[in-house]
Amino acid sequence: MDRNAQRMVGKVISNAMDKTVVVSVERLVKHKLYKKYMKRSKKYYAHDEKNAFNVGDTVQIVASKPLSKTKRWRASKLINVSKK
């Protein structure tokens, strides 16, 4: 794994695909006119080799080479387990 690779933390929203999880990453953006912070989220498809992550888990994803048409990230480590 590259030490300088881009990293993000997000919540797993789907694990229905084989070896793939969908991770939602939220960020805060300041409104240009009203100067108020708004939440913006984006979905990323991440490679999960062992199908280890479940819906609701908080995970760290790391940028990688393209693995498929939509997958450009790898789920690297579990930050927080969902309470199901």
Image (cartoon, rainbow, N blue to C red):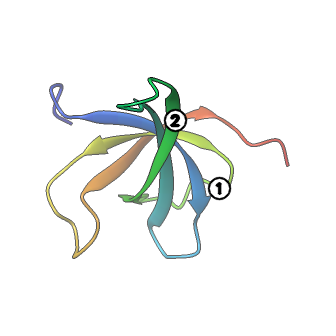
Q: Position of residue 40 (x, y in %)?
A: 47, 44
The furthest residue to the front: 33
**In front of the other: 34 or 50:** 34
Foreground tag (2 vs 1): 2
Residue 71 falls in which quadrant of the image? bottom left
What number is the disc on residue 54?
Answer: 1
Q: Position of residue 18 (x, y in %)?
A: 48, 75
Residue at disc 1, secondary structure: loop
Residue 63 falls in which quadrant of the image? top left
**In front of the other: 18 or 50:** 18
Characterize the local packing of mark 1: few (<14), some (14-19) or many (20 or more) Cα atoms within 10 angstroms.
some
Residue at disc 2, secondary structure: strand
- Which residue is drawn at the image coordinates 58% and 66% (left, top)? 15
Amino acid, disc 1: Asn
* Vertical comparison of 53 with 79: above or below: below
Amino acid, disc 2: Met
State the residue position of label 2: 38
Q: Quadrant of the N terminus?
A: top left
- Which residue is drawn at the image coordinates 67% and 57% (left, top)? 55
Q: Position of residue 21 (x, y in %)?
A: 49, 62
Residue 5 falls in which quadrant of the image? top left
**5 relative position to 78: left or right:** left
Q: How many marks?
A: 2
**1 relative position to 53: left or right:** left
**In front of the other: 39 or 21:** 39
The furthest residue to the right: 84
**In front of the other: 52 or 7:** 7
Q: Earlier in the sequence, mark 2 or mark 1?
A: 2
